[in-house]
Amino acid sequence: MSHVYEAPNWRDYKMNWYDPHREAEPLAAEIAVVDAGLALLVQAGILPHGQYDHAKLLAHRAAVRERFEIPWTAISHRMQRLIYAINAIAQPQVMVAVGIFCGNTYISNAGAAIGPGAVYQAQRLVGLEIRPAEADRARRNVAAMEGSAGVAEVLGEDGLAWLRGYQGTIDLLYLDADGPRGSAKSIYLDLLQAGLPALRPGSLVLAHNSVNSARSMANYLAYVRDSARFRASANMIVDDQGLEVSRY
Ligand SMILES: C[S@@+](CC[C@H](N)C(=O)[O-])C[C@H]1O[C@@H](n2cnc3c(N)ncnc32)[C@H](O)[C@@H]1O
């Protein structure tokens, strides 16, 4: 079953990719948008409930602002809150994020388990970034979060090859890799299919850019929105990037 959550004013909500810590709207407005999105995810049967610790999210946000080197990011405060909340609620033991660039998207997921926003203990939090220099930067960033040792792994590897060789279970898979030059997010379906054997019933798959890259992700979106393959999927239009949240 496929669902859509569309924040009423998402077209007017603008962040600066080069100044991502600046507030784009009052906190109460950000919370209201994400709460309404979480309510849709609960209604769709994708999440069990919509509650998470708001103070922990702000502690996480402050730590990222103070400790991370981020050259640019398209992760808005709304998106950071949504991704953090999904992880805080679902509490994945094994989280795998592919295409993590400098690590900001990775920590939006992993920040529910490491650093000052931690609300549970995870087993393994894997980040994959194909460009070695960016993987090194992401590793340095992530190491600044308490509790990361022994749980967080940032690997300078091709996520596709890694997923194809992975033998364990994945409770939450986050996709954000752009494919070879010009193909934008068309790599998502290949990544999903490589990771499929690792998913268990109830695993979540999050895919960034469901709005601005909807065209290059069309085959991926058709796949996760097919109720014969995924139990439910929701397009979360909280900003002009969007996040497709799917429950296996
Ligand atoms: C556009 S960035 C994601 C940025 C993120 N949305 C943000 O706003 O912070 C995508 C990243 O995926 C990486 N990438 C591309 N193909 C990959 C692959 N096969 N495995 C792992 N990483 C990959 C790229 O090097 C790039 O750093």
Image: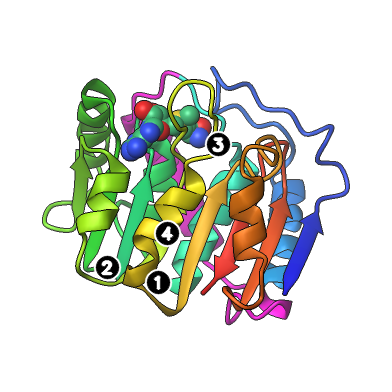
Q: CA distance from mark 3 to mark 2?
A: 23 Å
Q: Please identify, in this view, whether the residue under mark 4 or under mark 1 is nearer the observer.
A: 4
In the image, residue 238 sits, relative to residue 94, either above or below, namely above
Residue 192 in the image, given as x and y percentages of width and height: 44, 57
Q: Dot 4 corresponds to which residue?
A: 193
For label 3, count other residues whose C-alpha is less than 10 Å away and answer few (under 14), some (14-19) or many (20+): many
For label 2, count other residues whose C-alpha is less than 10 Å away and answer few (under 14), some (14-19) or many (20+): some
Q: CA distance from mark 3 to mark 1?
A: 21 Å
Picture disc at residue 75: 3
| SS label for mark 2 | loop
Q: Dot 1 corresponds to which residue?
A: 91
- Taking the magenta stretch, the answer to whether it contains residue 43 is yes
Sequence-wise, which precedes: disc 4 or disc 3?
3
- Provide the residue span drawn in magenta: 42-71
| SS label for mark 3 | loop
Residue 8 in the image, given as x and y percentages of width and height: 88, 48
